[in-house]
Amino acid sequence: MLTLGQAAQAEFVCFATRVEQLADPRRRFALSPEEFRRLNPNTLTCPVFRSTRDAELTKKLYRAAPVLIDERRPDGNPWGIRFLAMLHMSNDSHLFADAPGAGRLPLYEGKMVQAYDHRAASVEVNTANIVRAGQPKSTLLSEHRNPSFSVRPQSWIDRKEVNDRLGDWRSAWMIAFKSVTSPSNERTFIASLVPECGLANSLIGILPLVNDISRVACLFANLNAIAFDYVARNKVGGVNLNFFLVKQLPAFPPDRYTAADLAYIVPRVLELTYTAHDLAAWAQDLGYDGSPFTFDPDRRAQLRAELDACYARLYGLTRDELRYILDPADVLGADYPSETFRVLEKNEERDFSEYRTQRLVLAAWDALEQGALP
DNA sequence: TCTGGAGGCTACGTGTATAG
DNA sequence: CTATACACGTAGCCTCCAGA
């Protein structure tokens, strides 16, 4: 229902399936013109929330951090970010080779990466599948623990084609995010570092101009933070992370990070990302000449929880707000009309018999509050 | 149910032709 | 020479639905 008239702010109820839900104060939220501009400055579109708490919490996150790219302002792109949709699986398929060779780079697809993991799955061609032959084959732990292991793609592409599209980007790594996603998936915004490679259209490159790579590592951690994902899943309506959505997610600018922030974040990002020799250039750009770090799932869960807690603090959240993001029912009861990371919780209950992320992130939060983490 | 690739549509930018 | 119209190519976006 839409009513028009003069007012300082407008009131909304979304996801209502029954008339009586219009009267439920837990579902009702207000937005002023200024809040429209803060949340969606480029498109001025209306954000959609399931509950009052989601609306208020999202507004709070945007008060802490501006949108990634504000197209209205000359200084609205502090990272100097260029998005790169490098190769289209249909339109560019004539450029693809089905075997590695001299001067060829692997073509990375969305299914091959996960957060902080550029070796999540190889592509296995199942010729019995007429329409969708390329299927992901998850990397085994033994393969993950081998720093010489790289995932095998479905296709390869000439380095020249990649270089032509990279333009003046000279680093032998990129940040990329999975553009096919959903708010109902385990995680919505998934970013990975990738080595020199071609990117299929399901992986979008993020190329920042900032020279200080340790700050770029912070941008990357920001993109994978659970508080950032919480906003993403509130704003993604369909199954595509389009540029206009990504530009309007709340990310800290480079100068927001203090020396203490860098000392906390960068070593953790390095350890999570540099697990294989194929990202040696990334490690070197971060000033690290040592060997890759051992891929240890428990250790990685701990490091990611510490980063999630760190970013929750940077966004200015309270402990209860972080608890709400992890599980609204934990704070407001099972019937509260919102859901955040239900699938993550369900999958962890299946795999670990507990909601592990919730336990680890809250423990890391408490440790940070007590100054117990270096 | 979750995931994500393929294909197609649309808007936009660029180059070229034509009129004034 | 400038303004406008039009064609064309493609980046970006959206829908469909296969596969596990």
Image: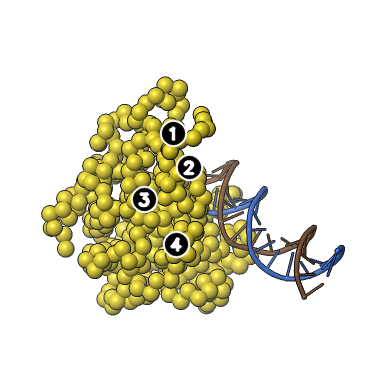
Chain colours: A yellow, B blue, C brown
Q: Residues within 10 Å of mark 4 (few under 14, many from 20)?
A: some
Query: Residue B10's x, y, as percent?
Result: 66, 49
Q: Are marks 2 and 3 on the same chain?
A: yes
> In whole angstroms, how far apart are the C-alphas of marks 4 and 3?
15 Å
Q: Are marks 4 and 3 on the same chain?
A: yes
Amino acid marked by disc 2: Cys
Q: Are marks 4 and 1 on the same chain?
A: yes
**What chain letter is assigned to the residue under label 4?**
A
> In whole angstroms, how far apart are the C-alphas of marks 4 and 2?
21 Å
Q: Which residue is mark 3?
A: A62
Q: Which residue is mark 2?
A: A46
Amino acid marked by disc 1: Phe
Amino acid marked by disc 3: Tyr
**Residue name at image x 29 percent, y 37 percent:** A328
Res A12 label: 1
> In whole angstroms, how far apart are the C-alphas of marks 1 and 2?
10 Å
**Residue name at image x 35 percent, y 59 percent:** A252
A124 or A58: nearer the viewer: A58
Mark 1 vs 2, N-terminal side: 1
Circles 2, 3 touching at the beta carbon (< 8 Å)? no
